[in-house]
Image (cartoon, coloured by chain):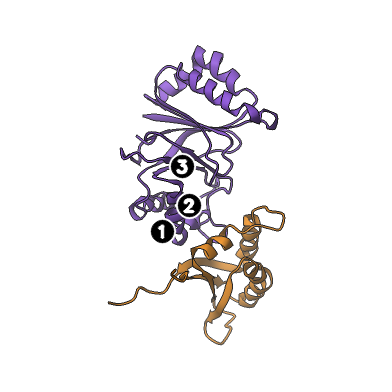
Chain colours: A orange, B purple
Amino acid sequence: MAEPRRILILDEVEARPGMASAVREAYRADYVPAAKARGMKLEAAWQHPPAIEIAELPATLFWLWSVEGEAGWWKQRLSRKPDGTDEREEKLAFWQSLAPLTLSRKRRMLTDQAAEH
Amino acid sequence: MFVSLRTITLPADRLGTRETVLVNLRAAANRLPGVVSNLVAPVYHQATINAGHLVWRMVHESEAAANQAMLSPAWRDHIVPTIAGAEVTGVGYRMTQKSPSAEGAKIWRGLLFSCFPPADPALVSELEQRTLLLPKYVPEIRAWGLNRAAWSEGRKPIHFVWEQEYDDIAGLTGPYMETPVHWGIVDAYFDADCPEYIVDPHLVQVVAAIAEPVIR
């Protein structure tokens, strides 16, 4: 039986000038633990501009997650609270709380590129 | 052609009457004027969401014919008493975007959903266009229809009806859910973690076993 393919989930959040550390802290404190509880594995976190915070400029923050196969993807997507109810409201509430600090955001699902033949 | 689709949820103390309601509703629906075809079936035991106990899908000659059916004496005398006390979720729509199949699929699935009132029309249109990619990349979808509601009744408004037919339930629970077109693209509009999120989480997913094509 084939191994489930690794699916990557990339969050890209553009913080308003001077707000990068607040966005980073909110994501770390409020999103990361919940995402891990849904079976997501944090692979990396990056930023632009690199290595420095420039208060005059927006900053783009990236978080790269992985899940194991389609089953792992749907597990995080259809996650439930301990009482069995849908977690969508909590997810939405988090992103709404972040909105005043940000200019835009994206979430993209990724896989390895197809092998060259 | 115009479709009226209803799901019927029986009160807890009347669950034992499901078969009787089904038989009576089928007979009553056959008395209605202007009905081209009529499906009354138990909701499938698997892969359903907020679907209740019975599904009732009628094809009418036109929207006007559907309205006339609801105003007919047969409706008042036979339909109303049959479904009295039940919760009905209903939607009417023209079958304008569709791809029927005569190949004899065995499972019909309808997803009834609405978009949040302030949803950007461009995103709604994008959702519609991307949903239409699914039949192209999921050959297990034998027939499909994606149509905007003309009217709806029930707890929540319904804006879209996304129907498919499959050879078996595994086509829905397997390839349809596993295609990257679904989880990688289309689902973003349903996913609160994505900025494209515009679909109200109150979905109705109804599945029924069918003996002949429903999507025509």
- Label 3 marks a residue whose chain is B
**On residue B207, which mark appears?**
none
Q: Residue at x 34, y 76 (%)?
A: A115
**Which residue is tagged 3?**
B109
Circle 2/circle 1 CB separation < 8 Å: no
Q: Which of pointers 3 and 1 indicates the residue nearer the eye?
A: 3
Whether residue A83 appears in this view of the structure is yes
Answer left or right for A86 relative to B96.
right
**Label 3: which secondary element:** strand
**On residue B181, which mark appears?**
1
Q: Residue at x 30, y 77 (%)?
A: A116
From the viewer's perspective, is residue B198 above or below residue B66? below
Circle 2/circle 3 CB separation < 8 Å: no
**Label 2: which secondary element:** helix
Answer left or right for B111 relative to A30.
left
Whether residue A12 appears in this view of the structure is no
Mark 3 surroundings: few (<14), some (14-19) or many (≥20) residues within 10 A:
many
The kind of residue on which mark 2 rests is: Thr
**On residue B173, which mark appears?**
2
From the viewer's perspective, is residue B177 above or below residue B83? below
